[in-house]
Image (cartoon, rainbow, N blue to C red):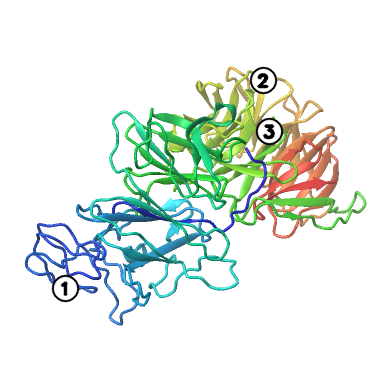
Amino acid sequence: MSRHVRHASLASWFLLATAGCNFDPHGGGGPATGGSSGGYGGASTAGAGTEASAGGTAGAPNGTGGSGCDVPTTPDGGAPVPDSSMPGVDGGSSDGATGMAHIRLGNFGSAHDSFDFCARRHDPANAAPYDIGPVLGSRGVSSGIPRQHASAYFDFAPGQYDFRLVAAGAPDCAKPLPLSTDAPFFIPYDRTAPETASDTWWTLVAHSFGNHGNDDFSTFQDEHASVPDQALVRFANVTSSQSAMDFGLGTGASFSPLFTNVAAHKVGSGQGVDALGYRPIAPVSQTYAVDRFAGGGGDVGKLLVDLPAGDVASFFGFNLDLVAVCHDLTPPKGLLSDCQGKPQIPPDAGTVTPPPSDAGPPDVPDHGSIREFSLGTGTLPTDMVLGPDGHFWIVESGLTTIAHLDTQGGLDRFDARLPSDDHATAFDPRGISVGPDGALWFGEIDRIMRMTLDGMLTAFPLPHGGGAAPRATTAGPDGNVWFVEPVANAIGRISTTGELTEFSIVTSDDEAPTPQGITKGADGNLWFSETSYRIGRITHDGQITKYAMPTTAAWATRLTAATDGNVWFTEENGSSVGRITPSGEIAEFSVMAGDPNAPIGAYAIVAREGELWFSEQNGQRIGKMTTAGVLDRVYPTPPNSMPKGIAVGPDGQIWYADYARNVVARLTP
């Protein structure tokens, strides 16, 4: 597994030909009865044509020229206007007529975050307008096709077409996207597909290699029927490097090849592989699909997948380190096919920003030396922990991912969702910790998740479902993982094999305790914080004792066990860091640094030998306090920051996750 950021050069765009829509800009009018719809660019058959609509003339009585659903235009001939009678306007698709060619377009490694597409009957003179589309926009979807996704399948009349990529939300087809975003001259993203016959499915791949206009094509005929009790798997090598690749299941020494030496722009072949490049395999679950450079080397791209019986899975290796899969027979999600790709590292990830050092005496704010490692725009990091591998594991709430960062900025990223999850849903991972088994444990909306150091996931559903909302987790001294459930008002305990026990912390005088953080204490018990202004202690068998805090509006959040034998905690709504002894004595220590107007909001806390370090998400500071309760220093973080999770690194320095700046930073005092 790579530890370093890779930036995608301009790579390939995909035109996936499979099943589709009922518009006919060249044919006749309204829906045909008793026959198949005309689709894009075609005519209906053996049915009665009806009145004309924009884009075609009325169908003849026998149905010639009749359209399934023409693309309406505005009175002035401008942008298509979605009509509620058009299939797919509600986000669905009613395509798949017999006698048609079926085409979908995917965004796998293009230079564009998202795009729509247009088409026309092939014009050798390149003079005719693109009069089909924008296909998704005309169906009411303005967000286009995001990276590592494909559109649903759309019906096209058999024949040959030219295709054009346009911006997501484009009002018409007039302005193509550029083939390359860094070329010194504009090259339109226009391409011609091969002739397509009726009732066939194809994958047409046009590649860009970053050399300003290479437009090689790869054409793959697709399978569209399943095999009982087996999954059909195909691998297409569309990497921008044009290197031959191996593809198989399993990582590292467990790698088992399915296809070897797959040439660039080709699908795998060999024993047991049919003429279209598909190989039947036994169904698998929670398995990594991996590509490698042919003949040796380590894993290059990998993706955690489920391949159930009856699945037809087309894998694509692209941008060297990325693998995506489309489950070709699964119904589309709105106007997007069921495709899955690895969470991407944003283009700005890996940049390093070292603000100038401005150290002062201990009694004044001190900048220290802060070095930032970007995770990328929109990642929104929250909690973090130092893993047993000596690297940091960071919850990225903006992507529903777990980032893996080494101390030099080498970055990898793992999806925090199962392959079977709806990847349009944010599962809100929280509270990551290292379990007694050496794996990573964290909470999501309605479950506890376990992740191995190679990204393998196991989900343990909670009985409360969405009413659990587990947050902080910690390894207990009893060999279990303990966690808090703020919505369910409970403390949970789960074994490393998934045996679950819950303990209610509701009492007659504390009906909504809302636990926030949990840690193991030096006394061998678990200690937790409540927003009802209490610190609680729970024994291994669930005996609970609570201690009232002196400041009733403080809102205790995160906790840590320090070397002095006490548990320390932050007060998110207060101006203090708190300490509780094993016997329950609580003391609070101000973090205002002599400034009564300083913003409050201490969030996370971590212990280092004889010291406590804490983040102030509202105060834009990192604070240092001795175990005697003396605020030693505060270190301002860069402008517009929101420091959250905090950890001691393998280098002994303080590291924190900055939610607002999308970075992990190292503070050298």
Horizontal and vertical percent position of residue 486: 54, 37
Choose mark 2 or mark 1, whichever is in front.
Answer: 1
Q: Which image quadrant is residue 453 in?
A: top right
157 and 216: which one is in front? 216
Q: Indicate whether 137 appears above or below 404.
A: below
Q: Given the image, on which type of amino acid does mark 3 rest?
A: Gly
Q: Which of marks 2 and 3 is nearer the N terminus?
A: 3
- Give how far across and how far down residue 144 sits, in percent: 42, 61
Q: Would you say 335 lies left or right of 209 here?
A: left
Looking at the image, is mark 2 or mark 1 earlier in the sequence?
A: 1
Residue at 52% over, 65% down: 213
Can residue 517 be seen in this snapshot? no
Q: How many angstroms separate mark 1 from mark 3 (CA)?
A: 66 Å
Please tell me whether residue 377 is drawn above or below residue 577 in the rendered image: below
Q: Which of marks 1 and 3 is nearer the N terminus?
A: 1
Q: In this view, does 263 lie to the left or right of 44?
A: right
Q: Where is residue 610 in the image (x, y as percent from the top left)?
A: 85, 33
Q: Which mark identifies residue 387?
A: 3
Q: In the rendered image, which quarter contains the N terminus?
A: top right
Q: Measure the alpha-carbon separation of dots 2 and 1.
A: 76 Å
**What is the crowding at mark 1: few (fewer than 14 residues within 10 Å), some, or many (at least 20)?**
some
Residue 375 place in picture, x, y as percent? 65, 50
Residue type, numbered disc 1: Ala
State the residue position of label 2.
477
Q: Which one is in front in this view, the residue at disc 1 or the one at disc 3? A: 1
* Mark nearer the viewer, 2 or 3: 3
- Residue 444, relative to residue 76: is it above or below? above
Number of dots carrying numbers: 3
Q: Check disc 1 and report the residue beneath it.
A: 52
